[in-house]
């Protein structure tokens, strides 16, 4: 049996990534772990957070979020220069729910006073909670910022919610912060903000 020897036995040749893999396009900016706090805030210029044209868009990954109070909605508000924005938004969410035997048809859930709010409510007694990803386009720029994303969670009746959503600002403005909280009560979860360079 012939033994084939590599042409290059260097460590870099053995560990080199294929040319198609770009390890620099997703950059972790900051992770915050919330444990029974009123909100989680990412503001430009605070604790290494940057919202400007450094990145093409931003990704917020939400892991195991839930409220200190059962049956509450998680939501996202925009911020401008360190304060909550009072802008109007146009959110649409398409969702299904399923309880093991019955499911619903897709439905629209507009919400015009926050950038985002889930259609249902999150139970806080089982380790299923809310998991989701949010992509922000135009945040940190003078434009009409847009957010898209998806999420999954269960409510206190055991219905599994699967949602896809988007939202946009109605006015040209420079949104440079986001605040995540519950409609009532404190919040738990892990929130990681990434910049996407390409």
Image: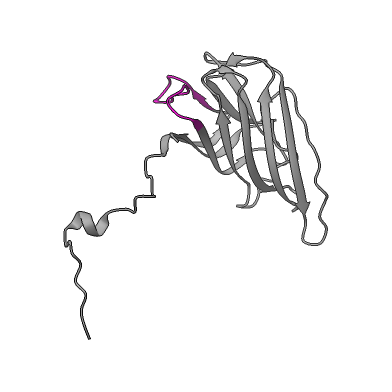
Percent from the top left, x then y, of residue 70? 70, 41
The picture quadrant where one finds residue 133 is: top right
Could one spot residue 5 in this view of the protein?
A: yes
Task: Look at the magenta stretch and give its main secondary structure.
Answer: loop
Q: Residue at x 41, y 37 (%)?
A: 28
Q: Is residue 157 visible?
A: no
58 sits to left or right of 156: left
Could you say which is closer to the camera, residue 121 or residue 6?
A: 6
The answer to whether residue 68 is left or right of residue 104 is left
Q: Which residues are magenta?
A: 41-57
Give x and y (percent) for residue 108.
80, 38
**Closer to us: 63 or 25:** 25
Q: How many marks?
A: 0
Q: Is residue 50 above or below residue 118?
A: above
| The image quarter in which residue 87 lies | top right
Residue 55 part of the magenta segment = yes
Task: Say which residue appears at 60% left-offset and 22% top-offset.
Answer: 78
């Amino acid at each position: 049996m012939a033994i084939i020897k590599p042409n290059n036995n260097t460590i870099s040749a053995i560990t080199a990534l294929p040319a198609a893999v770009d390890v620099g396009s997703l950059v972790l900016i900051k992770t915050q772990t919330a444990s029974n706090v009123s909100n989680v805030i990412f503001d430009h210029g605070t604790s290494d957070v940057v919202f400007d044209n450094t990145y093409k868009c931003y990704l917020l990954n939400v892991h195991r979020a839930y409220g200190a109070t059962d049956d509450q909605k998680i939501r996202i508000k925009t911020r401008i220069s360190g304060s909550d924005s009072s802008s109007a938004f146009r959110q649409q969410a398409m969702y299904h729910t399923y309880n093991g035997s019955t499911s619903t048809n897709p439905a629209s859930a507009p919400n015009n006073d926050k950038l985002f709010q889930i259609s249902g409510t999150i139970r806080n007694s089982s380790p299923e909670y809310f998991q989701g990803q949010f992509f922000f386009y135009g945040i940190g720029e003078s434009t009409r910022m847009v957010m898209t994303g998806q999420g999954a969670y269960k409510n206190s009746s055991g219905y599994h919610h699967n949602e896809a959503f988007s939202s946009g600002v109605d006015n040209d403005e420079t949104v440079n912060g986001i605040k995540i909280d519950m409609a009532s009560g404190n919040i738990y979860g892990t929130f990681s903000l990434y910049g996407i360079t390409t």
